[in-house]
Image (tube, grey):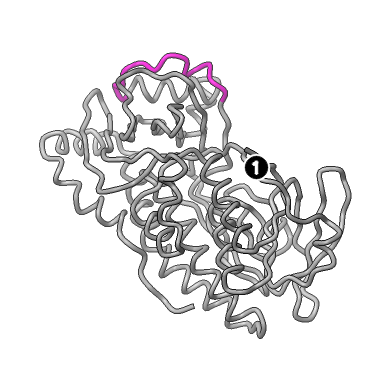
Amino acid sequence: MSVEATTDLRAAAREAWDAVVVGAGPSGALAARELARAGRSALLVDRASFPRWKVCGACLNGRALDVLASAGLGGLVERRGGVPLSAFRVWAGGRSARIGLPRGFAISRARLDAALVEAAIEAGAAFLPETRAALGPVEGATRRLALRGADGAAVETGARVAIAADGLGGSFIGADLGPRREESARSRVGAGGTLRESPAFLRPGTIYMAVARGGYAGLVRVEDGTLNVGAALDRALVRERGGLGPAIAACLREAGLPAVPGIEEASWKGTATLTRGAARPAAERLLLVGDAARYVEPFTGEGMAWALASAAAAAPFVAAAAGDWRPEHERRWAELFERRIGRPQRRCRAIAWGLRRPLLVRAAVAALAGAPALAAPLVRGLDSAPRAGRP
């Protein structure tokens, strides 16, 4: 079921918004919802129509669920048919280990994102899909933005604060405006796709992960039985194998995962390089949230948790700072973002470092096969709630 616009370009141009949020993924939709709940006028803009598919691992861990619950959306994922997750099985070098997960859900991004946009609309946020936004200058107490509809019509609007939530490869802040992006020289590319049919051994409720020398792939069944596949791949492997599908299939074979028919021929979509971020998560009357601010390769739903946690932190911050923006607000947002998001991202960065070392991975899988409890401290760390901090 589609999520329709609640406003149009002309109306958006006439309004003096407290916040314009660009990008209606989990971070953008939740930020707009929380601002609307606080009585602020919020416009949520996205270049796509909804529902829409996104490259993503399709998993939410306990931390993500806690953020939703604290926002009054604790039952949203279950109501939308999310599949409870209880285990994580990793394969490497022909061996596998099963690790229990304390909580989590698998749900397609098409269904989750649409549900969060609907929640934002219900809270009073305006929604404008199929619209591209470009960041403009600051004029007095207003950040200017240019909006262009799918039919080419264009207007300008303004907001006390603009929030960039347009993801890993977003272009909203532009090449010459706002914080510049930086990326690791060894950063992998992301890939995602779905299979309508999958082997019986890939059971609902378990995340399957195959780790190889050239990357790794995660597989999980979502609410409609579809197999969602997300991968992080070395660019050299993709070139060598002649495409994303063959590269993912090569990772599965090397890891020892049983064959998944149709995986090479499936329709795959790639992403910009992973493990990248902005030089700064804020500029004058501009905040970056979610993947637009910083992205590190996640494993069992951590990426969704970071996106939601940064959005939940942004809403009270904007509500407090928008009326009287001062230069120190940029520093304060950077510090708050680091407290809420930086520490768990550093844990995942360390795991990504380890996954590039085949001998280390094989030794770890062998150890976990015999003693799964060894993974418990790491799982608790990745699943734990964010560290609190004042807006």
Kind of residue at disc 1: Phe
Residue situated furthest right in the rendering: 153
- Between 292 and 181, the one lying in front of the other is 292
> Is residue 90 positioned above or below 321 on the image?
above
Quadrant in the picture for residue 321: bottom right
- Between 272 and 241, the one lying in front of the other is 272
Residue at the disc numbered 1: 50
Q: Is residue 258 magenta?
A: yes
Residue situated furthest left in the rendering: 370
Left or right of residue 221: residue 255: left
Left or right of residue 167: residue 12: right
Q: Is label 1 in a helix, a strand or a loop?
A: loop
Q: Position of residue 46 (x, y in %)?
A: 69, 50
Q: Position of residue 201 (x, y in %)?
A: 30, 21
> What kind of secondary structure does the magenta stretch mostly adopt?
loop
> Is residue 70 positioned above or below 75 on the image?
below
Left or right of residue 294: residue 131: right
* Residue appearing at x 66%, y 40% in the figure: 2
Quadrant in the picture for residue 199: top left
Q: Is residue 127 magenta?
A: no
Q: Position of residue 101 (x, y in %)?
A: 26, 44
- Badge 1: residue crowd in 10 Å (few <14, some 14–19, many ≥20): many
* Residue appearing at x 62%, y 38% in the figure: 1
Q: Which residues are magenta?
A: 255-267
* Residue appearing at x 40%, y 19% in the figure: 198
Number of marks present in the image shown: 1
- Between 274 and 172, the one lying in front of the other is 172
Q: Position of residue 38 (x, y in %)?
A: 57, 73
